[in-house]
Image (cartoon, rainbow, N blue to C red):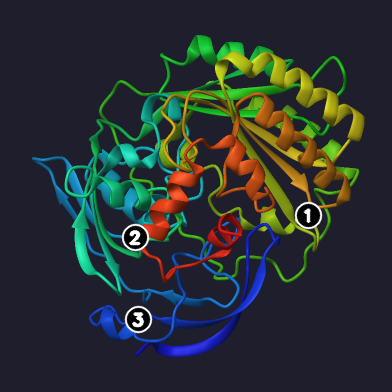
Amino acid sequence: MISRVSSKTFRSLDLYSEEDCEYGLIEKNDLERSFATESPYAIMGSGRSLVGAYFGKGVRVLQQPNEPPMIELDRQARLLRVSASATVCQVYNFLIDNHYILTGLPSYPGVTIGGCVAANVHGQNHYREGCFVENIIDLTIYHPDFGQGIISRTSDKELFDLTVGGFGLTGIIIQVTVRVVPVHTDLLNVSLRRFNSLEQGYEMLMLDKEDYDYFHGWVDLANLNPNVEKGFYLRAKFRSEPRFSGKVVRREKSKHTHLAWKPNVFGGPLLKTINKIYSSSINLRLNRQATIGDFIFPSKNKLWYFSMFGREGIIEHQVLIPHSSVRSYILQLKQVLIEKKPFMSLCHMKLFKGRKKLLNFDGDGLCLAIHFKTNQCSLGVLEKLDHINVEHDCITNIIKDSRVPPIILKAQYSQYDEFLSGIRKYDPNKTFENTISQRLFL
């Protein structure tokens, strides 16, 4: 049986989704008994999903107990075997202490490794590192109908592809074997470049893409006008001398996803002033030194940010624009934003270099992540952007944006039907469900 069964209210980080679900901890040594009750199930990692990918309507939420994870390093083979319940923070600290790193990590280190697999996340230099899938050697998964097994690209490619970036619909991920990279230091030299338009920022990134190990790009769309969209990006290289700082990444202290009080700071006129102050203060970071952890995890210990949009919450719209469409896309994007004037707290930008696969957010081009306050104005703007995205052959990140309708996703992802039919064939009883699958299979 599942231990400590209770009923809980789950809310997504963006506050777009909320459900009352039955909740219980999985008995690690008796998975069969843990899944003996009526499905559907959803597997909860750290519970930090932006779109509520770990719960759903009528779903039983299961979570692995909070206990020390298994983490084993094979130095000779440069492989790490790790429990899927381990957080990115725990893995990073273990590896850096042994002079290794894992690439393709998300900006928030509180998520689990299993979550990284299910979302096929990306990090601060997708152009070099690709998505998390590039690290994976094999996965140990469990499904109550099929038992436990190890899958890889060679042993079971179809199931492997459905699992990585598959939103947790093929079963619970137990263990992951990943490729790790040795490093001679955890210290980076950081420099800054400013730009006056999205297009100029894109051109600068294209020029710098081969020469730096990591990038942060930020654009002030809150103060957008017809002539200027100011921004900057921080670029970082490993220092040449072999030295380690000894600094670890601290875990989020709060167990709560949101603050009890949700002030509307980023959804009002104060936002423009905040962005101007932030842009000016960034000069303090010119030509500085930072640890890898400080640079690649800009979202660490910042969950409070998602409570700063009031009770309506936030919509993160992350889109990947093909290189051939970047200039025309930016022009149309600016026209819509200037005309409608939605509240946007920020826009991040990255370069991607990868290949499209099923419903993975991957491919070649410019990636923009824009944060909107949830209101009717933003929803109207996003509906327009959905169609602009389709016209420009863009894809929207399903794990980021809760409100994209299936008809738009189907138009964007050429393998949409292939993914759905693959899941139906593998698990016709829909043993695992969540807010994403319930939208995709609507």
Residue 389 is drawn in which quadrant? top right
Residue at 53%, 65% (x, y): give it: 434
**Which of labels 3 and 1 is toward the front?**
3
Q: CA distance from mark 1 to mark 2?
A: 40 Å
Q: What residue type is disc 3 on?
A: Phe
In the image, is 420 to the left or to the right of 333? left
- The residue to which callout 1 is attached is 309
**Which of labels 1 and 2 is toward the front?**
2
Q: How many marks?
A: 3
Question: Is 66 situated above or below 208?
Answer: below
Observer-nearest residue: 256 or 184? 256
Q: CA distance from mark 3 to mark 2?
A: 18 Å
Q: Position of residue 358 (x, y in %)?
A: 44, 41
Structural crowding at the residue carrying mark 3, measured as other residues with C-alpha within 10 Å and reported as few (<14), some (14–19) or many (≥20): many
N-terminal of the two: label 3 or label 2?
Answer: 3
- The residue to which callout 3 is attached is 35
Q: Position of residue 401 (x, y in %)?
A: 64, 48
Q: SS for tag 2? A: helix
N-terminal of the two: label 3 or label 1?
Answer: 3
Q: What residue type is disc 1 on?
A: Phe
Question: Is 161 situated above or below 150?
Answer: above
Q: Confirm or deny contact between disc 1 and disc 2 (CB under 8 A).
A: no
Structural crowding at the residue carrying mark 1, measured as other residues with C-alpha within 10 Å and reported as few (<14), some (14–19) or many (≥20): many
